[in-house]
Amino acid sequence: MADQLDSLKTGQTGGVVLLVNTPGGISQEYITAGSGKDLNNPYRDLTEQERHRLQAMVDDDYEIFVAEMAVGRKLDPQRIRNELGAGIFSARQAVNVGLADAVMGRDEFFRHAATAAGLEPDKTVVERVAEPTGLSSLLGAKRAWGTSLPLSALGEKVVASASLCSVTAPIAYAGGLSGVCGNS
């Protein structure tokens, strides 16, 4: 047991490690009504019918995606299917392949949006950035894009995610730098 605990040490303090021994295993049982109610249940394999149904849904959504991208970005649908796919691109790559017009900071984008809307940027004010609702909220969005929680809302100690240490933009933090980037 001590060897198992030693192998689980992460160098962080204040955590609890719980090991559970289940000689009989853990079983999952789902009671449902209607075909497909437990589709994608992680405790059983997909049936061929379910796999076909999911693939048909993905294919249908991909065709909608290709059609919208082809019209909206003036791209050949075959180029989207054969070259671009539905991949993820960096901002500069997206501009280079025609998926975006430019790379802009938040303020530059707001000025651009005001101009595109026929407004005078210097006389245009963003009064409220909408908070996440619907799907974005379900996917974990906690606040409007580009906004941060005030330090006072975070309590005495600010905890940063690992992604904070990989950005090149200016950041603000409270406490020692070792606490921010996980160095001890």
Image (tube, rainbow, N blue to C red):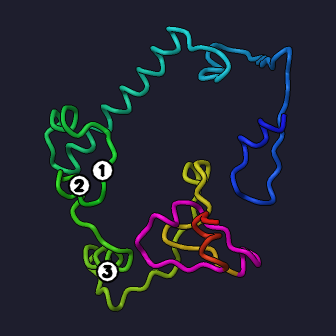
Residue 176 at x, y = what percent?
Answer: 64, 77
Locate residue 45: give its quadrant.
top right
- The amino acid on which the numbered mark 2 sits, given as a three-letter code, is Gln
SS state under label 2: helix
Identify the image quadrant of the C terminus. bottom right
Residue 124 at x, y = what percent?
Answer: 37, 86
Identify the image quadrant of the N terminus. top right
Q: Residue at x 49, y 71 (%)?
A: 146
Locate residue 114: give its quadrant.
bottom left
Question: Residue 176 or 35: which is nearer the viewer?
Answer: 176
Q: Which residue is mark 1?
A: 89
Cα distance in 3D space between marks 2 and 1:
6 Å
Q: Residue at x 77, y 19 (%)?
A: 28
Cα distance in 3D space between marks 3 and 1:
24 Å
Query: Mark 3 or 1 closer to N-term?
Result: 1
Q: Residue at x 67, y 68 (%)?
A: 159
Let me know if residue 166 is in the magenta part.
yes
Q: Which residue is mark 3?
A: 111
Q: Which residue is mark 2?
A: 93
Magenta span covers which residues?
152-174
SS state under label 3: helix
